[in-house]
């Protein structure tokens, strides 16, 4: 069974509270999402593999650590997952970025795939899938399946807010994928929106409503 990591550092909780407020505009919403993503990135990458290399400081030669081999791929689920990419890239500037385009059908709430472009060597990388909202879990599960079909076997899912039912679905369908969230909210409403949540993350990031 995969692990669920709730990264509820006080600074993350504070920033998330501002994001939740309905009067927070797109500019601040985007900035806060970027800042939280960088902070969450510390934990999501905690077990990244290091190797020893010899370097020379101004004083002497010494052994030091560096991230080994092929590193990271960040894969946002479009659109809202894009809002978490820049924070992670600030942390790991050499990461490659793939994109999976999914939207929820408004009647059925089932995800529909419309785009997939991934780094050629994705299967050799640790993959961080990003999406601020883990609601029914349908979008995340489909994205994870698409990555596994392409050979990925080291994947983690990074979301801002989840609900128990979405988390349970990902754990059931993808027991090998650890889930990282900043908060676990109470439930879904009749439109499968997270309660209390923060509304439609994509619309709030891009100002489309
Ligand atoms: C939102 C969100 C997730 C999905 C979560 O995207 O960003 O991708 O819904 O819901 P689920 O867990 O029930 O699948 P949306 O479909 O609204 O698309 P958008 O990001 O383009 O706005
Ligand atoms: N997608 C969102 O953007 N927000 C929710 O609360 C649920 C799905």
Image (tube, rainbow, N blue to C red):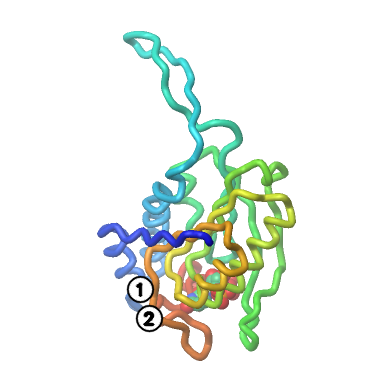
Secondary structure category for the residue under label 2: loop
Secondary structure category for the residue under label 1: helix
Residue 71 as seen in the image, left or right of residue 187: right
Decide: marks 1, 2 in contact (CB < 8 A)? yes
- Considering every residue shown, the one lying at the far top of the view is 60
Residue 40 as seen in the image, left or right of residue 121: left
Q: Residue at x 47, y 83 (%)?
A: 188
| Residue 49 versus residue 208 in the image, above or below | above
Residue 65 visible, this orientation: yes
Q: Residue at x 53, y 59 (%)?
A: 157
Q: Label 2: which residue? A: 196
Q: CA distance from mark 1 to mark 2?
A: 8 Å
Q: Is mark 2 within 8 Å of ligand 2?
A: no
Badge 1 or badge 2: first in the primary sequence: 1
| Residue 206 versus residue 3 in the image, above or below | below
- Considering every residue shown, the one lying at the far bottom of the view is 190
Residue 208 visible, this orientation: no
Neighbourhood count class around disc 1 (C-alpha, 10 Å): few under 14, some 14–19, many 20 upward:
some
Q: Label 1: which residue? A: 20
């Amino acid at each position: 069974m995969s692990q669920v990591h709730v990264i509820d550092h006080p600074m993350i909780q504070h920033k998330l509270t501002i994001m939740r407020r309905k009067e927070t505009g797109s500019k601040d919403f985007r900035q806060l999402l970027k800042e939280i993503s960088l902070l969450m990135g510390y934990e999501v990458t905690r077990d990244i593999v290091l190797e020893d290399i010899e370097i020379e400081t101004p004083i002497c030669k010494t052994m030091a650590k560096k991230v080994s081999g092929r590193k990271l791929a960040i894969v946002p689920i479009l659109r809202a997952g894009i809002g978490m990419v820049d924070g992670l890239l600030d942390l790991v500037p050499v990461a490659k970025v793939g994109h999976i385009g999914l939207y929820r059908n408004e009647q059925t709430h089932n995800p529909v795939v419309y785009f997939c472009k991934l780094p050629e060597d994705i299967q050799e990388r640790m993959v961080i899938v990003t999406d601020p909202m883990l609601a029914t879990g349908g979008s995340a599960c489909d994205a994870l399946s698409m990555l596994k079909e392409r050979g990925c076997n080291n994947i983690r899912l990074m979301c801002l807010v989840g609900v128990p039912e979405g988390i349970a679905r990902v754990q059931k369908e993808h027991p090998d994928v650890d889930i990282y969230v900043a908060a676990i909210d109470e439930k879904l409403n009749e439109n499968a929106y997270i309660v209390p949540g923060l509304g439609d993350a994509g619309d709030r990031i891009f100002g489309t409503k």
